[in-house]
Amino acid sequence: MTDKRLVLTTCGSLEEARSIAHALVERQLAACVNIAPQIESVYRWQGEVETAAEWLLVIKTTADAFNRLREALSELHSYELPECIEIAIEDGSAAYLEWIGESVR
C-alpha cells in the first residue's frame, strides 16, 4: 500500500470540470486530474430517481492532502452534495507515484 490516492467526483458541465481540475492542480492538492467526458449517472436524490449527463474527474493526490482536497471540492463545486470518494492506490510505477508525491503539497 502507498500513501497515494485516487479521488472521484462528478460535475454537471465540462466548464465546471475544467475549473475544478485547474484549481486543484494550481493549489497543489492534485498532481493530475483526468476528465472523462459525458458519462450518464442514474441516482436517487430527494426521493426521486434521476438521470444526468456528467463529467467524471479522476484526481491523483496523497493521503495527507485528501482532507484539504475534500474541503476544496466543497468550496469549488456547484452541487449541494458533491461526490468525493477516496480510493487507496495499492501499487504502481514507482516513478509515477513519486511524481504524485512531489506535485502535491
Image: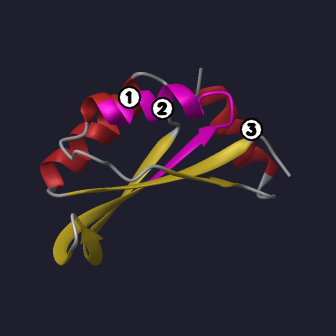
**Residue appearing at x 68%, y 36% in the figure:** 63
Q: Are marks 2 and 1 in contact (CB under 8 Å)?
A: yes
Range of magenta residues: 58-74
Where on the picture, by quarter, is residue 64?
top right
How many angstroms separate mark 2 from mark 1 (CA)?
5 Å
Q: Quadrant of residue 20?
A: top left
Residue 92 to residue 78: above or below: below
Q: Which residue is mark 2?
A: 69
Is label 3 in a helix, a strand or a loop? helix
- Of the residues tagged 2 and 3, which is closer to the observer? 2
Viewer-proximal residue among 73 and 22: 73
In terms of depth relative to the viewer, which is nearer, 69 or 34?
69
Query: Disc 2 versus disc 3: distance between alpha carbons?
Result: 19 Å
Q: Is residue 88 left or right of residue 59?
A: right
User: Which label belongs to residue 98?
Assistant: 3
Say which label, 2 or 3, has the lower sequence index.
2
Q: Sequence-wise, which precedes: disc 3 or disc 1?
A: 1
Few, some or many C-alpha atoms within 10 Å of disc 3 (few <14, some 14-19, many ≥20)?
few
Residue 38 position, x and y percent, is 22, 72
Question: What amino acid is found at the position of numbered circle 3 in the picture?
Answer: Glu
**Residue occupying the point 17% across, 73% down:** 52
